[in-house]
Image (spheres, rainbow, N blue to C red):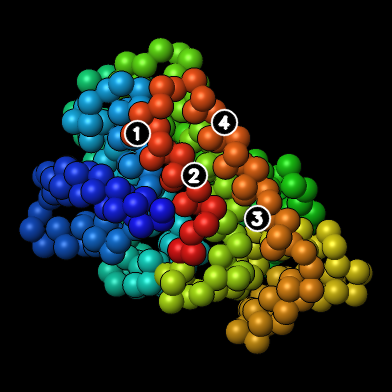
Amino acid sequence: MSSIVLDKLRELGALVDEYMEEVLLRDTSGDFREAVLYQVKVGGKRIRPALTILSCEAAGGRIEDAVPVAAAIELVHNYSLILDDIIDRGELRRGKPTLRKVYSDVMAILVATHYRESIVQAINDTKCPVELHSLLATTLKRLIEGERLDILFEQAGRHEEYLIKHRYYNITLNDYFKMIRYKTAELMRASCLSGAIVADADNSIRKSLSEYGLNIGMAFQIVDDLLDIFGEERVFGKKVGKDIIEHKLGNIVVLLSLEELDEVEKRRLLGILRKDEVHDRDVREAITIIKTTTSKERAYRMAKEFIESAIHSLRRLEMTEAREMLEEIGYFIVKRRW
């Protein structure tokens, strides 16, 4: 069934890519175009714009009305990835060098700013720009707050006064869920809600699709955390153990492991996360410690529960091909390996 989902993502992604590239190249000088298109050309699953289009269809709307806002959603996602790679000094994304690695941090910042304004232009091309501008403004602010929390959950590596003062040394599951909701799930929610908005759906349908998007977003990030620790680099497209290298306590596998470990092993794992520089051998040691726990199984159960809640949210919608595909995307998210 995953092949059917991937085919659908590619099909809908192609619709969005054509429009997205057009809006990115508006008012763009010739020698800047390559850098501007680099981020969206290096791939990606296009799950978010697919959710927008499918939500629009499931709510009774037309695909063509959803394409501009679907492109805006994908641009928000890529905008956040560019900033994320600058913040984390990332060198690999989707199995290829990051934008900042190829073009420099300075150019990456300019490209990100260009994306932000292209989002505005894309929303202006929709049939209800005022409502969608408000939704995406709120979503972006929450995304930024999620990114801020993610940084403050890091245990070392940054020495600025503000970061040291506000760093979290103890994180609860509620802290983690708040962070991933803002950093990841709110954009998934906006993806689905924006589709319902352009379909002019009633409030009950909007609520259903909004809840669906939020829940699959939570599951998506949990699976991402799992793949960071247990994935295969050539399939995952990112360095395995990247969260450990970046001193992140905000990874569900790490948090659940710390709940189970005895004091000696807990100190060992935290000691690795709190080293100023984490080497490959440290990553291997940390993963070996983590594998002594049941954190992998527990995290997968959490992801599956969020998916079950997401699919339950769709019960108010008529059973259509679009609704069926939304359900299949939920199952795909929890089973994915990249």
Q: Position of residue 9 (x, y in %)?
A: 31, 49
For disc 1, the neighbor class at 10 Å (few under 14, some 14 to 19, many from 20) is some
Whether residue 141 is visible here, answered yes or no, is no
Which residue is farthest bottom?
A: 281
Nearer the observer, 33 or 239: 239
Q: Position of residue 223 (x, y in %)?
A: 57, 56
Q: Quadrant of residue 234?
A: bottom left
Q: Counting residues from the N terminus, which is met first, the one under dot 4 or under dot 1?
A: 4
Amino acid type at image mark 2:
Gly
Are circles 2 and 4 on residues that touch, CB within 8 Å? Answer: no
Q: Counting residues from the N terminus, which is met first, the one under dot 3 or under dot 4?
A: 3
Q: Which dot, 3 or 4, sits closer to the camera?
A: 4
Q: Counting residues from the N terminus, which is met first, the one under dot 2 or under dot 1?
A: 1
Nearer the observer, 281 or 168: 281
Are circles 4 and 1 on residues that touch, CB within 8 Å? Answer: no
Q: Position of residue 324 (x, y in %)?
A: 40, 36
What is the distance, in whole Å, between disc 3 and disc 4 at their CAs?
18 Å
Q: Which residue is mark 3?
A: 300
Q: Which residue is mark 4?
A: 312
Q: Which residue is mark 2?
A: 330
Q: Position of residue 41 (x, y in %)?
A: 24, 61
What is the distance, in whole Å, between disc 4 and disc 1 at their CAs?
15 Å
